[in-house]
Amino acid sequence: MASSSSSSKTGLKKMLTLKSSDGDEFELEESIVIQCQTIKHMVEDGFSLIPLQNVDTKTLTKIIEYMKKHAEKTESNKEEIKNFNKEFVKGSFDDQFELVSAANYLHINGLMDLLCQSIADRINNKSVRAVREIFNISNDYTPDEEEKVRDEHKWAHEGGEFDESLD
Amino acid sequence: MSRDAVREYLTTHDCIEEDLIALRKIKLEGFVNTKNERLFMKLMLARSPSLVKVIVKPAELIEQKSRKKINLKKRSNVSVRLSLVPIQVLITSLVRLRKNNNYIAQNYMNYFNEGRGTDRIFELPRHLIDDILNHMTIKEIARMSVLSRKWNHKWSTHPTILLDRWFHEEIKYRNRSSSSNISDFKNIVNNILLKHSGHIITFVLDISGVGSDDRDIWLRYVSNRGVKELKIKNSTQSTYTLPSFLFNSGELSHLDITNCAFNMPLASTSFQNLVKLDLKKISFDPTLAYTILEAPHLLTMFFTDCNGLQYLNISASRLIGLHIVDSHYVDLKILKAYAELKVLTIASCDKIQQYEFWRRFTLTEIICSFPKLIGFCFNNDLFKTV
């Protein structure tokens, strides 16, 4: 992609360039990018090439997809945005973790909320074993301790089947 | 260390009080997989953080003296995970052990993975972890305490406790499928509160089906823990009178009450830090007319489906938002106290006209008496009245 240039290339629309940690550059309209509080502040400080050292190309592509869609948000396409969000969070847990960290770094509140909700929903009702696997949690209890903790919260472990799947 | 030594060790040390910080190598020969041996291994794995090398030689292997070292890397299940271990570990015949004692092998892997295998969630910034947990029910968060010590700690210090309608439903659902009864609910809440060891910032309680003594104790408990955001909802028909200590809570910043009775015995009562007050389905009693509620930092008030607002004296010199919806007997003289008001809503209220005071003002006059007003919403009824 073209390197940075603050001069307006497409008439009135002011363009910005985002650079991923892999070195790829993405040119976008300023109006789309300022959904990120972090970038907004940099734009206000006069930057037009914005290096994002904590965001790789794969994640940045997803985030741009999100910002583009949400820049189109109006009163009439609420349903469309809702469906978009639903599709957007369908990736793997790994992707979601990358995305939520990046959204936090870029300070896109809407996306952070969306991902936190989605991660919470997906852990909901997962079995303890599955959650350990998904989050890479080492069980540092001894079996006796674990049994004791389980016993203390017996009420939380009863009342239904838990989901063993890892996605 | 021979088998006898293990036995001797265990009889003299029932448990190890302190970590064996310096211990780096353990060699265990003649392992026959007794309970004591397993216990010993457990203790070692749990209590020796500097451990780099463990050699376990089962008894029969020593006798055979053949195929002493089994290369774990070539074994399916175990090898995958052990090959991640950065420390060089020589384990003889762990695969064989694993068959007999799944726990030791499991714990081995956990132990050595601990340093590098990081918990994904705890890699996230704290506020994101809290955000994720805030989207989960309290039952789910409690269940997660069994994941690891860190999660147990997270659970017992999570600043938000939501005992809302959902929680009631979950407990009810649970009771349906097990033999426990309703008094369990009380035990569960007691258990949650007693386990909690940090600040409780947000406490939400639906008091349906809870004895009044219990709820007063719980509210007292969270008050003492410095609760800042308190939401109490009564979804039953019966009356619940809020305990009076709530009205002198200096910590509260948000108070949200639905369908409870107020009883403020003091001539003046104060909410020093209250920012938002949200009252729903409340009938204010004429006796309240003698009480002044001081809320110097209050910014917004909501009254929904309330009765007897004319008896309420809330001194809030900084109030910028006042919303009165679906309420009866609203005396607009209460507005006069709030000169800083920026947003005012009075909608679907009736019986306003009954007050003489009200008749003396036109709508324009009312609006003009709030120089800072930037938004207002009056419904049609009010226009008819004025």
Image: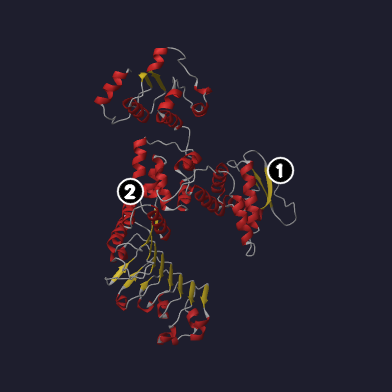
Q: What residue is shown at x 34% (from left), y 36% (from top)?
A: A144
Marks 1 and 2 on same chain? no
**In this rendering, is residue A9 above or below B39?**
below
- Quadrant of the image for the N terminus of chain B? top left
**In this rendering, is residue B272 above or below A103?**
below
Q: Nearer the viewer, mark 1 or mark 2?
A: 2
Q: Chain ID for label 2?
A: B
State the separation of the CA atoms marked 1 and 2. 57 Å
Q: What residue is shown at x 63% (from left), y 47% (from top)?
A: A62
Identity, as a three-letter code, of the amino acid under mark 2: Lys
Helix, strand or loop under label 1:
loop
Q: Position of residue A30 (x, y in %)?
A: 66, 53
Task: Kindly identify which residue carries mark 2.
Answer: B195
Does residue B351 appear in this view? Answer: yes
**In this rendering, is residue B202 above or below B259?**
above
Q: Position of residue A45 (x, y in %)?
A: 60, 51
**Dot 1: within a 10 Å radius of its alpha carbon, few (fewer than 14), some, or many (20 or more) residues?**
few
Q: Which mark is residue A3?
A: 1
Does residue B386 appear in this view? Answer: no
